[in-house]
Image: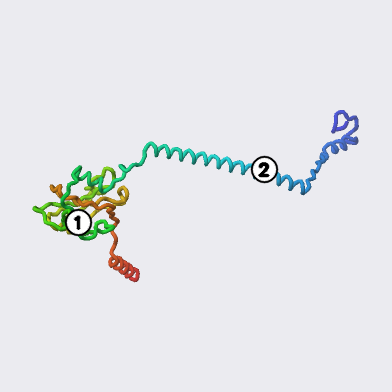
Amino acid sequence: MCKLSNLCQGHDTNCDCKTSLYQCEIIKPVPIPLMKCSESDFMETFIRIISQQNELIKSIAEQTKATLEKISELVNQDSIEKAQINPVTNEDITTSTTLLHTLCGENTNFSHFLHLDNDIPTPAYKERAFSLILSIQDLQGNKTILPRTVIFKVLLYTAENPPKLLSISTSGDKIMRGTLEVEGESVIFFRKIIVKEVTSHFRNGSLFFVIVPKDADYIKPLIIENFIIKARKMPNDEIKKKCKIAQDEVQV
């Protein structure tokens, strides 16, 4: 009986079952149709894709431009509304006249004035001393002698509105030291004035330098605007000396 199939009546393997089995195991290839694409069709498709992308980019750019214009319009409108709500007036500007009113009130009947006889440093430097000489003059600008000795003081005021008297620096120390109060009846000499703060820490980057008389409202205070103090400047001789020391150390 055939060993390869129960239905086969042949003896042993002398039949056609073996040949049929081998033929069934052979897988015939499936033909795959080839798609022919010409070079012109490919270029046409490629150009169409590029054109579509360009149109898309152009549309995005136009939308972005419109959005930015709208944002700019809203920002400008908001700025205008804020300016209308908080208009800038002359009252917000601090001047020597404003400070004089703070110091003397309504009193403007001065018979004597303080005249600066030497130049105040512009700018002054932190922790560097300078001197001031002043003379007392009458309404005609003539130097005069007061009937009694008057005390004069050096003060610093901020440029804020209202101006504020400064006595303490940002580090917590006294903002000035040296000769800050002197007596005089004709010539006023402040031998050594030292400021211990830079004006960049304050509004407008400057202060008011003021010399006021004590208990003498007939003398007009001296107010100097835009008084600037910068960080201490090293003298040229000291710079050269330090450079020379550094060079000697390098050579050693």
> Picture coordinates of residue 69 (x, y %)?
52, 41
Counting labels gives 2
Q: Amino acid at mark 1?
A: His
Report the amino acid beneath label 2: Gln
Name the secondary structure under disc 1: strand
Q: Residue at x 55, y 42 (%)?
A: 65
Q: Residue at x 28, y 55 (%)?
A: 229
- x, y percent for residue 15: 90, 35
Q: Position of residue 12 (x, y in %)?
A: 88, 34
Q: State the residue at coordinates (78%, 47%).
A: 38
In this rendering, position of residue 107 left or right of residue 54: left
Which label is found at residue 60?
A: none
For disc 1, the marked residue is: 115
User: For numbered disc 2, what is the local secondary structure?
Assistant: helix
- Which label sits in the foreground, 2 or 1? 1
Toward the viewer: 105 or 229? 105
Tell me the quadrant of the picture where the C terminus can be found: bottom left
Binning the other alpha carbons within 10 Å of mark 2 as few (below 14), some (14 to 19) or many (20 upward) gives few
Task: Name the residue carrying label 2.
Answer: 52
Among numbered discs 2 and 1, the one appearing first in the sequence: 2
